[in-house]
């Protein structure tokens, strides 16, 4: 018995050591740093300051704007992605027997395979006021060109559009898998009962998709809290603070100013916020699972 | 037989001519002056400014002279700063030569990221270094508390570039003062042409632009920071909400009417591209961009532009902004002697002349009178005219510089796009910078 326990511990040890060094230690060190004034390029600036970094962050207007923008970005992106993904997934189910549909499906998921930096650069060119195709089309239509990424009215909307373009395929794939797993008999029974399309969606497809979609939403919430590359490439958080998000804020403090203490506090707050949202969604999923049982 | 002899002669010439040219530079015996670095790799970290391609042409000469292999890594402006600080703080020996911008001097010296070059300079033949031949204000830039942090090779001065054809047609003179600059821009904004291009992008681009103009408006960023100040960092009380500072930000806002659509996202590259592609009638840009305007492969205004000194406030002295790059040795390099060999060779009079002719900005006063350079680059007299008015601390060189510049830039950007009033934005910037400087131990009387 004791020998079995030893062997079991031996097998668990690598995973525990890995977690300790790669996850637990950085987290604890980050928590410690967040209570200091440490700055990498100013070694003389250090010392324990308790929760000052956190109180400074919470009272900082720019950080609050960054949180608001992150929430708007996440909610708007995910909602639009869900709608687009659902309709496209249904379309792919409908044309699944048509020859060549797998090629169209592959083309649709291509944006997801690009790195965010590349998609950011691509859209910077497309939306460029002087060189971009978007404004070229506007000019051809007799309209004045528009500074999509340079106007505080449209910069965040443009970033949301790029985000949606890149990540709708992810939710679409999840939904496609969910829709494909619905037994055909259910559709046939619904048709015999005279159900219309909305009733089919509501009473057959939605229950099947619910858990898959919720897991997809959790992934997308985490992704949106981490979204950085697209904004770094297209707007750098500007103009003004129009596209400032929490990752951009933390990045600038950490790697622009090397305020690792203050930057760590921002990172810890981001972690807490992402965890709260994930926990709420997880609870929701578990609740739904309980209801199903 | 004759054919073989001719072939042999041609081959030998191809091999020996570059070698003899390299050895004959400056009349310096480089074979004796430089070490044999065969089998060693020299790694240089620098910004990807337009002159990077000149290094590709010039570095093979050093490789030929010493046997060393040179690897050059170039990044964007902010990324270069990040990478260099990380190299310094991690005490990495990955790079031997560090190329750094004027505002980073204090940070790199205080952080101990670069070697003090004083002993290297002392041990080198003064005729090779010709230290006094460098631009005097840039010697001030690389000097930090008795330390020589680097050797100048690419000082930039902000010049006014204007379209001669458009100015002539409109009967305008290049702007001497800021009101002239605005009036010219207004007059030339018509029929798809815009009067000027400015840096508006959030963060360091517009933050640096604020520093470019604050002296021209007769203001100063901090109480003790002004041309001729005995100690620019003695009293660091920020004056960001002064009438002059407010006027600078208001000027940026007003100029939005005379700059192309999408200006709020314009930084250094875009500012220059707008002029080179003929979309704007004038641009105040660093001298590093000027060779590109004169290059037919990059510009459509090659024969249609001239330069003038940076405009200034009415009744005030000119104050052309000074910036640019110096070469230092990474404190943690394991090949410091080879790095110094490279720096002294690259910044020697003849190599640097080749660099200027290949598109680099002039760092040596003698090059501003060199007939070859004057014949090739018509803007050099404007550079020479600007030099006496340049000020080493026009952007602060203290370790907090990057944070100061970016923070100011974020507030100016918020004011320009209308998120905050100009007064509120600059008051908030003033408070933030005062707190930052107080925490860092500077004298701030607020």
Image: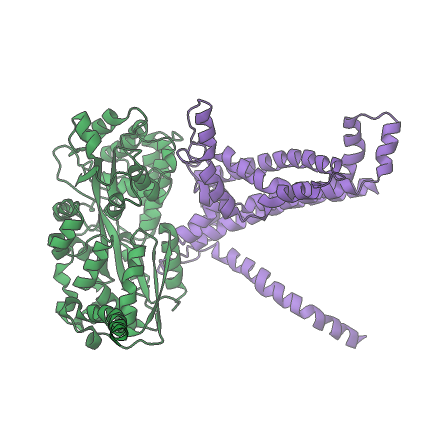
Chain colours: A purple, B green
Q: Tell me what residue is drawn at x 25 percent, y 27 percent.
A: B188
Residue toward you, B76 or B392: B76
Q: Which residue lies at the image location 13% right of the left edge and 36% below the top edge?
A: B316
Which of the 4 image quarters holds residue A80?
top right
Res B56 visible: yes
Q: Nearer the viewer, residue B325 or A56?
A: B325
Residue drawn at point x = 39 percent, y = 67 percent: B94
Q: Residue at x 79, y 27 (%)?
A: A199
Rendered location of residue A108, percent (x, y): 63, 41
> Is B325 left, or right, of B311 in this rendering?
right
Q: Position of residue A71 (x, y in %)?
A: 56, 37
Against B409, is A33 above or below? Answer: below
Q: Is residue B222 above or below residue B398?
A: above
Q: Is residue A285 left or right of residue B424?
A: right
Q: Name the spot of residue B323 as percent of width and height, x first.
A: 24, 50
User: Looking at this rendering, what residue extends furthest in the front direction?
Assistant: B1
Residue B431 in sight from this viewpoint: no
Left or right: A235, with B194 as reference point = right
Residue that extends furthest to the top in the rendered view of this protein = A142
Q: Nearer the viewer, residue B149 or A170?
A: A170
Number of dots carrying numbers: 0
- Work out which quarter of the rendered image holds the C terminus of chain B and state it: top left
Q: Is residue A202 above or below residue B306?
A: above
The answer to which quarter of the image holds residue B382 is top left
In percent of width and height, residue B262 lies at 39, 33
Q: Quadrant of the N terminus of chain B?
A: bottom left
């Amino acid at each position: 018995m004791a020998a079995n326990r030893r062997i079991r511990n031996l097998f668990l040890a690598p995973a525990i050591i890995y977690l300790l060094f790669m996850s637990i230690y950085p987290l604890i060190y980050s928590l410690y740093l967040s209570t200091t004034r440490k700055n990498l390029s100013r070694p003389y600036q250090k010392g324990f300051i308790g929760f000052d970094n956190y109180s400074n962050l919470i009272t900082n207007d720019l950080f609050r704007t960054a949180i608001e923008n992150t929430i708007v970005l996440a909610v708007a992106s995910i909602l639009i992605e869900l709608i687009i993904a659902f309709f496209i997934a249904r379309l792919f189910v409908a044309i699944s027997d048509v020859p060549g549909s797998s090629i169209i499906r592959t083309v649709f998921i291509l944006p997801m395979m690009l790195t965010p930096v590349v998609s950011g650069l691509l859209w910077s060119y497309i939306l460029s006021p002087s060189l971009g195709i978007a404004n070229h089309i506007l000019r051809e239509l007799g309209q004045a060109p528009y500074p999509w990424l340079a106007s505080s009215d449209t910069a965040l909307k443009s970033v949301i559009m790029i985000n949606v373009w890149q990540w709708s395929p992810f939710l679409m794939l999840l939904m496609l898998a969910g829709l494909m797993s619905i037994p055909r008999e259910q559709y046939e029974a619904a048709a015999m009962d005279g159900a219309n399309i909305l009733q089919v969606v509501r009473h057959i497809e939605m229950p099947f998709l619910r858990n898959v979609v919720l897991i997809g939403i959790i992934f997308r919430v985490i992704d949106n809290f981490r979204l950085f590359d697209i904004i770094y490439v297209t707007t750098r958080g500007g103009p003004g603070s129009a596209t400032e998000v929490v990752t951009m804020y933390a990045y600038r403090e950490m790697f622009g100013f090397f305020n690792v203490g203050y930057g760590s506090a921002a990172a810890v707050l981001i972690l807490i916020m992402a965890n709260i949202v994930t926990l709420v969604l997880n609870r929701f999923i578990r609740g739904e699972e309980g209801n199903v049982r | 037989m004759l054919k073989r002899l001719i072939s042999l002669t041609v081959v030998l010439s191809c091999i020996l001519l570059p070698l003899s040219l390299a050895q004959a530079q400056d009349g310096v015996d480089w074979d004796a002056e430089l070490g044999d670095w065969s089998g060693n790799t020299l790694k240089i970290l620098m910004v990807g400014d337009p002159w990077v391609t000149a290094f590709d042409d010039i570095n093979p000469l050093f490789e030929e002279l010493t046997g060393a292999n040179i690897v050059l890594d170039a990044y964007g402006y902010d990324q270069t700063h990040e990478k260099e600080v990380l190299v310094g703080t991690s005490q990495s020996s990955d790079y031997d030569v560090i190329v750094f911008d004027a505002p980073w001097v204090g940070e790199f010296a205080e952080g101990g990221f670069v070697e003090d070059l004083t002993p290297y300079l002392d041990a080198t033949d003064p005729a090779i270094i010709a230290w006094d031949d460098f631009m005097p204000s840039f010697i001030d830039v690389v000097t930090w508390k008795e330390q020589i942090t680097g050797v100048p090779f690419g000082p930039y001065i902000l010049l006014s570039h204007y379209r001669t054809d458009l100015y002539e047609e409109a009967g305008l003179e290049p702007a001497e003062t800021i009101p002239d600059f605005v009036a010219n821009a207004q007059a030339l904004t018509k029929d798809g042409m815009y009067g000027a291009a400015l840096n508006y992008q959030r963060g360091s681009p517009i933050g640096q632009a604020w520093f470019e103009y604050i002296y021209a408006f007769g203001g100063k960023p901090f109480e003790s920071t002004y041309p001729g100040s005995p100690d620019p960092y003695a009293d660091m009380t920020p004056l960001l909400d002064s009438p002059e500072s407010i006027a600078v930000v208001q000027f940026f806002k007003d100029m939005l009417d005379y700059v192309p659509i999408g200006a709020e996202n314009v930084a250094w590259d875009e500012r220059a591209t707008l002029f080179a592609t003929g979309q704007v009638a004038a641009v105040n840009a660093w001298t590093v961009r000027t060779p590109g305007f004169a290059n037919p492969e990059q510009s459509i205004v090659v024969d249609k532009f001239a330069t003038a000194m940076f405009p200034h406030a009415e009744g005030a002295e000119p104050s052309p902004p000074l910036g640019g790059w110096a070469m230092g040795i990474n404190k943690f390099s394991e090949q410091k002697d080879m790095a110094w060999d490279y720096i002294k060779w690259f910044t020697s009079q003849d190599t640097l002349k080749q660099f200027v002719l290949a598109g680099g900005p002039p760092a040596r006063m003698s090059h501003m009178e060199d007939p070859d350079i004057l014949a090739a680059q018509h803007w050099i007299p404007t550079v020479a005219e600007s030099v006496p008015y340049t000020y080493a601390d026009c952007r602060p060189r203290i370790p907090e510089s990057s944070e100061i510049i970016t923070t100011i830039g974020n507030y100016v950007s918020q004011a320009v796009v209308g998120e905050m009033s100009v007064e509120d934005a600059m008051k908030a910037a003033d408070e933030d910078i005062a707190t930052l400087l107080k925490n860092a131990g500077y004298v701030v009387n607020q």
